[in-house]
Amino acid sequence: MPVYAWQAVDAEGKPHKGTIEAASDVGARQLVRDRGLLPTGVTLAGDTTRTKGAGITLFRRGVSSKTLAAVTRQLSTLIGSDIRIEEALRIAAQQTEGQPVAVVLTDVRAAILEGRSFAAALGRHPKVFPEFYRASIAAGEQSGKLSTVLAHLTEFVGNQEKARRKVQLALLYPALLAGVSLLMITLMMVYVVPDIVRVFVSRGAELPFLTRALIALSAFVQSFGVYVLIALGVAGVAWNRWLAIPANSRRFAEFLLKTPPFAGFVQHLNAARFAGSLATLVRSDVPLVEALQAAAAVTPNAFARERALVTAARVREGSSLRRAMAEADVFPPLLLAIVAAGEQSGKLGLGLERAAQDLEQELDSLVQALVSLVEPGVLLVMGGIVLLMVLAILMPIVNLNNLAGL
């Protein structure tokens, strides 16, 4: 049944909006009236948000990871209470009515009522539900452990959101400081330095090298600053298009994974994501091969993701998990050792969970160390630039005063 987005007002003139399923726009208007509201606009939701038959994937206001975590928590609770999927989706859509995610949930419910699986219905919205999310749901459906997988997904998505916010808040002040400093330096180059240069030139003083360099840099910024910004923008677009090619993206991912100083951080990040998601699925009694394929989808690095899929193929062929992961050559020794111990003891899920926790702790320590160095680093760099500018301006003035004293 089609999904309609509606706007209406109540008896007091207060605006309301939301989504509703109806056979036609006339039926949608009638359903809105049945709620005691006066409809002011009813449009088919897919007309403005659907893209090339892939479902409603793009919105004027995106679906944040925080919203995704909240929706996952609601669905986990409802489905864990033996409520049918389509009914759980309807309730969750009502709870988020007026938000973009409500349209998504309603469309997913409609796809399920048409006979699609839950994972296939989520696949209509790849911008909202990541590949790992959909793969985990598919594995949960096939194994009959959907409610358990959703419970672990709630924890996983929530932890990712917390980590993302933590890094963003830590980097906010250094980024603001760097931006303001660069703006002030640019304004000085364009408006302050030229006026000072005129004074020096009128006096006929011999300028130090540092002052001459500052004057040359100021002239360059005035003459070519706009072109430099345009060139940087073009370079950024070209770089994104180059990375959009799968072969180039894989090549760059391999470079990051194997080249110092990026290798250690990238390897720990991918191993932590892989181990955490694999532990979630194994603990949910998802078959190991399917769990490996789903865990590979959450691996951020394209090259590591490819090697993780090869690991799943080797396990399917009969290889042990530890041997297959060692052959992939993208996982740290700590993870390999814990996997070997987990296979021998028959407690692979607990071992993977412990490994994921250890890797996350190491990753958090590394991120905190890097972030703690960013702020003083920005202060030192910007302070050094300002000091050089001040010296370049003051040195000729001191020389002029000395000449005047003689």
Image (cartoon, rainbow, N blue to C red):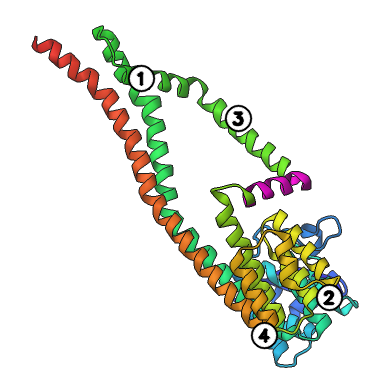
Q: CA distance from mark 2 to mark 3?
A: 47 Å
Tag 2: residue type? Ala
| Image quadrant where one finds the N terminus | bottom right
Identify the residue under disc 1: 194
At x 38% / y 51%, what residue is drawn? 375
Please indicate whether residue 201 sits to the left or right of residue 15 in the image: left
Residue located at (64% from left, 76% from top):
352
Q: Residue 373 vs residue 38: left or right? A: left
Residue at 61% x, 35% y is: 233
Disc 3 or 1, which lies upstream in sequence? 1
Which kind of residue does numbered mark 4 sit on? Ser
Q: Residue at x 62, y 75 (%)?
A: 338
- Tell me which amino acid carries mark 1: Pro
Residue 253 in percent (x, y) is at: 68, 50
Residue 74 appears at what percent x and percent y?
65, 82
The answer to whether residue 128 of the structure is visible from this angle is no
- Mark 1 vs mark 4: which is more N-terminal? 1
Name the residue beneath numbered marker 3.
Answer: 231
Q: Nearer the viewer, mark 4 or mark 3?
A: 4
Q: Are marks 1 and 2 in contact (CB under 8 Å)?
A: no
Quarter of the image for the C terminus: give it. Answer: top left
Q: Residues within 10 Å of mark 1 (few under 14, many from 20)?
A: some
Mark 4 vs mark 2, CA separation in Å: 45 Å
Per the model, the C-alpha gap separating discs 1 and 4 is 74 Å
Cβ–Cβ under 8 Å for marks 2 and 3 = no
Along the polypeptide, which appears first: circle 1 or circle 2? 2
Neighbor class of circle 3 (other Cα within 10 Å; few <14, some 14-19, many 20+) is few
Which tag, 4 or 3, sits closer to the chain's start?
3
Question: Label 2, on which residue?
Answer: 110
Q: Which segment did they paint magenta?
A: 244-257
